Amino acid sequence: MSILSSAADVLRCFSVTRNELTVTEVSSVLGLPKSNVSRLLRAMRDAGFLETVGETKRYRPGLLLHQTGHIYRFATSLIDRTDAIVARVAAEIGHTGYISMRRGGEVVGITVHPGRNILRVVSTIGDRISAFASSTGRALLARLPDDEVRKLYAQGFVPPSATAPQTLDDLITRLAAIRRAGFAESHDEAVRGVGAISVAVGDPVTGDEAALCISYPASTVTPHERTRIIAALGEGAAEIAAVIGDKRFIPVRFPIEEKSL
């Protein structure tokens, strides 16, 4: 394993709820010898990727990462545009909104807007979930040709729940339905008890693609709320697609069918 790969693995150990780590904690998470981890963390500190917390033996992301993340966040127009739409919809509907991007067979949350409802769903930004078993992931996978999806899951997958796609053919069938409807929906799949609705849009210039998502406790959303969420996300994504020239955008089809995709 290269030092870059090892450094990337260390950075993935951090999250919003785990923003400081010790050598022992990283060693436990990655299953590596403490001596190796200690040398790696010191090297990352010297390069500016990490910094020590005061006089303690704890590490946190360094200034270089903060600067890079700041540049990435505000220089990526697609994220800016989609985040503005999701913020607006989340405020109107009251449920939590996300922007997610696909990385291979997984999706990762980029931004979040917590809902105002008493019962609300909030997941950690940066955590990765399976693309095939999430509305965000399937909305993005639906933008790919079926043969690319089959290559992506050539080794198969293990469904996390009974409501997730059970086979590759099942996934392909659901993606076809998403292309017809213009949105993806999940219920009690990658995260138990959680429902979500997503649409996807992409920038033809940069190649970036993002999923706009509203999530909620699956048992609480009403048919009226569901329709409002689908319509609001679809209209917002259509605005972005028109501005940036997304020829692969899949518009929401009305009237909205009452079935999970």
Image (cartoon, rainbow, N blue to C red):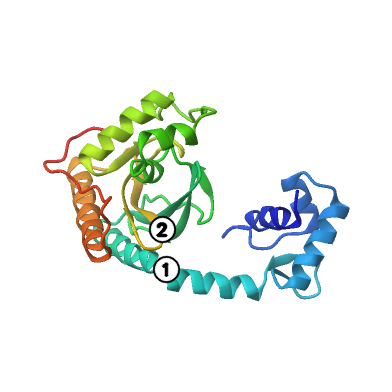
- Name the residue: 50% across, 45% down: 104
Q: Residue furthest left?
A: 255
**What secondary structure is found at the residue carrying circle 1?**
loop
- In this orientation, which residue lies closer to the viewer: 251 or 154? 154
Q: Which residue is mark 1?
A: 76
Q: Earlier in the sequence, mark 2 or mark 1?
A: 1
- In this orientation, which residue lies closer to the viewer: 21 or 241? 241
Q: Position of residue 123 (x, y in %)?
A: 47, 51
Pointer 1 local density, CA inside 10 Å: few below 14, some 14–19, many at least 20: few
The reply to whether residue 191 is in sight is: yes
- In this orientation, which residue lies closer to the viewer: 1 or 126? 1
Q: Are marks 2 and 1 in contact (CB under 8 Å)?
A: yes
Q: Position of residue 23 (x, y in %)?
A: 80, 57
Q: Which residue is mark 2?
A: 208
Quadrant for the C terminus in the image: top left
**What secondary structure is found at the residue carrying circle 2?**
loop
Tag on residue 188? none
Q: Position of residue 193 (x, y in %)?
A: 41, 37
From the viewer's perspective, tell me whether residue 242 is left or right of residue 114: left
- In this orientation, which residue lies closer to the viewer: 23 or 149? 149
